Amino acid sequence: MENPDATPEPDQTPAKELSPAAKRALAEAEERRKAYEAATAALPKEIGGRGGKEPGRYGDWEVKGLTSDF
């Protein structure tokens, strides 16, 4: 009789080897991500801002469920 609470064993198949181009693309993406995070951290912090997603980027301004489009 099987235990219904037992977790199944994870798949033990070996990971697929990535091509050199895929490895290079992943490394470039990681470099871009780190550069973006460093640039974001260097910006001054907003005091008293609305928080959330940038309305200029997403096209609307939402506060407490009310949306105004601009």
Image (cartoon, rainbow, N blue to C red):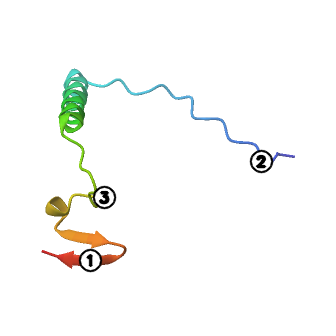
Residue drawn at x 66%, y 35% as measured from the top left: 9
Residue drawn at x 16%, y 67% as measured from the top left: 59
**Type of the residue with mark 1:** Thr
The percent position of residue 4, horizontal first and vertical second, equals 79, 50
Most extreme residue toward the top, as rendered?
20
* Category of crowding for the residue at label 1, using alpha-carbon neighbours closer than 10 angstroms: few (below 14), some (14–19), many (at least 20): few
Q: Nearer the viewer, residue 31 or 58?
A: 58
- SS at badge 1: strand
Residue 67 tag number: 1
Residue 52 tag number: 3
Q: Please identify the quarter of the rendering in which residue 17 is found.
A: top left
Lower position in the chain sequence, tag 2 or tag 1: 2
Whether residues under marks 2 and 1 lie with C-beta atoms below 8 angstroms apart, the answer is no
Lower position in the chain sequence, tag 2 or tag 3: 2
Residue drawn at x 24%, y 29% as measured from the top left: 34
To which residue does mark 2 refer?
Answer: 5
Q: Nearer the viewer, residue 46 or 10?
A: 46
**Type of the residue with mark 2:** Asp
